[in-house]
Amino acid sequence: MAEGNQTHLVQFILQGLPEQSSHGWTLFGLFSWLYLVSLTGNLLISVAILLDAHLHKPMYFFLAHLSLADACFVSTTVPNLLVSLGTQDRSISYCRCLTQLYFFLTFGDLDIFLLAVMAYDRYVAICYPLHYATTLGPTRCVFLVATCWLLTSLVALTHTLLMAQLSFCTDKTIPGFFCDLGPLMQASCSNPQTNMLVLLTLGGAVILAPFALVLLSYVHIALAILRTPSAQGRRKAFSTCGSHLTMVFLFFGTVIRAYLCPTDPGSAAAGDTVAIVMYTVITPTVNPFIYSLRNGDMQAALARLVRGQRTT
């Protein structure tokens, strides 16, 4: 089969879905509940920050975009998974597969970039508190978020266009429950060397560069906190970073495990599956709880939103 346009391919088969119907319905109920919690929680946080004047600050501005990205991120994979589990139809068309790949990469990378921006926000707030308002003014905040959206869209488009150049022969099964770069390259019958090179270089940079910036920011934050003479001041500073640090290690840990330390294709890939489910489903689900349970301002804003109160 010639490489190039593959739109005549009818469908792929998602091999990562359970074959036994009893397990399928159990997973259908579980993922339905997780999706509902994730979507509701993240949208509530975004709307609360938008409507509550008390939360019109850089930290919450970035959090609103992170929550919106999480809501979109989980929506790229779970609805199709639920349909497949409910109908026992594990097929997905070629065009839908590439579309899912593009949006999955866009919102997944957007999470990574926004977590790095939020680390920079905490760095400025703790290390240079007197310059915080001028350093992260409205224009700078909008610029940082717009840059994140633009860069992630370009990275996702690059990977998707390269994937569209691969050919797929008779074996069109995908070893996963959604269309991702690694499984699609395994399913291709053409040489994915260019795709693999771009994945390792560009994809590795997208993951590791923001992670390095996060770590560097928190090294400076930790040093600044340790120099704080007041024990109460140190506790307050650490508490403002706790939620973000939890998300950083949960998200980056599972992403690095799944993409930069994958299991050998010939061996059992249960660890990879768990890591992928963790960052595609579990992380967006727990994000609203992590950022709201230990944040009094966020809890108050959510309570006002539920009561129908709006601040100005």
Image (cartoon, grey):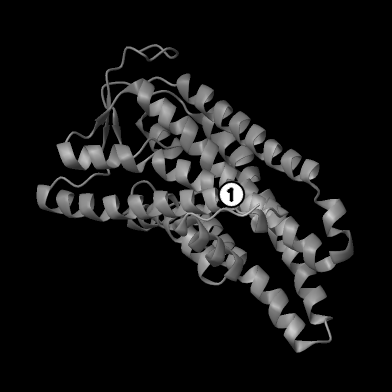
Residue type at mark 1 is Leu
Q: Is residue 31 left or right of residue 105?
A: left
Q: In percent of the image, x 78 and y 77: which residue is there?
A: 225
Tell me if residue 121 comes above or below residue 235 in the rendering: above
Q: Quadrant of the N terminus?
A: top left
Tell me if residue 224 comes above or below residue 80 in the rendering: below
> Residue 57 is drawn in which quadrant?
bottom right
Q: In percent of the image, x 18 and y 33: which residue is there?
A: 89
Which residue is label 1 attached to? 51
- Residue 212: in sight, yes or no? no
> Residue 236 is drawn in which quadrant?
bottom right
- Position in image of residue 183 (x %, y %): 38, 38
User: Observer-nearest residue: 217 or 180?
Assistant: 217
User: Observer-nearest residue: 178 or 149?
Assistant: 149
Q: Is residue 123 left or right of residue 87?
A: right
Q: In percent of the image, x 34 and y 43: which residue is there?
A: 78
Decide: few, some or many residues near mark 1? Use Cα within 10 Å; few <14, some 14-19, many ≥20: some
- Position in image of residue 75 (x %, y %): 40, 41
User: Observer-nearest residue: 131 or 23?
Assistant: 131
Q: How many marks?
A: 1
- Position in image of residue 174 (x %, y %): 31, 35
- Tag 1, which secondary structure? helix
- Position in image of residue 139 (x %, y %): 79, 41
- Residue 285: in sight, yes or no? yes
Q: In percent of the image, x 65 and y 57: which residue is there?
A: 55
